[in-house]
Amino acid sequence: MSLLTVGPFSLTQGLIIQARVSAENSLGFSVPSSLNTAGILAQIVPHKPATAPTRNIGTTIDKLMVDYALPTALLTGGNTILSLNLQWDQGTSGSQWSTLIGE
């Protein structure tokens, strides 16, 4: 979606997209597939959270609690966020990242 919502396509959120596919190899292109007449819905790529995460006062030696603000686009009718991915840099000043939770 990040390619289809910018540049020469500039599809808008909520537009129904119909598509077909062709394969290409050294001998040329295949016959195109059938058109997906039901279409798919153009959606925006999720935005990053509005603020950097901060440690919640409920954090203990055994539990990390993080506060963050949802992306503004989500609050104004953007797409539903299915998962958040929390990472930490393992004390490497941002050169190595490990996922703590999320997909």
Image (tube, rainbow, N blue to C red):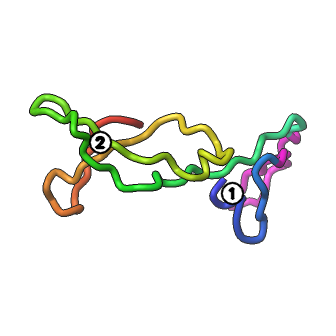
Image check: 36 left or right of 44? right
Q: Which amino acid does the dot numbered 1 rest on?
A: Asn
Provide residue 67's location: percent of width, then percent of height.
Answer: 34, 43
Image check: 18 left or right of 48? right
Q: Which residue is mark 2?
A: 99
Q: Which amino acid does the dot numbered 2 rest on?
A: Thr
Which residue is drawn at the image coordinates 29% and 46% (left, top)?
87
Q: Nearer the viewer, residue 100 or 53?
A: 53
Which residue is drawn at the image coordinates 19% and 35% (left, top)?
59
The residue sitting at the left extreme is 61
Alpha carbons under labels 1 and 2: distance apart: 38 Å
- Asked if the residues shown at circle 1 and circle 2 are in contact, with their CB atoms under 8 angstroms apart, the answer is no
| Residue range corresponding to the magenta coloring | 15-35
The disc placed on residue 25 is 1
The quadrant in which the C terminus is found is top left
Q: Nearer the viewer, residue 84 or 52?
A: 52
The residue sitting at the top extreme is 62
Q: Of circles 1 and 2, which is in front?
A: 2
Name the element at disc 1.
strand
| 58 vs 76: above or below | above
Which residue is drawn at the image coordinates 84% and 45% (left, top)?
16
Name the element at disc 2.
strand
| Magenta region, main secondary structure | loop
Q: Quadrant of residue 33?
A: top right
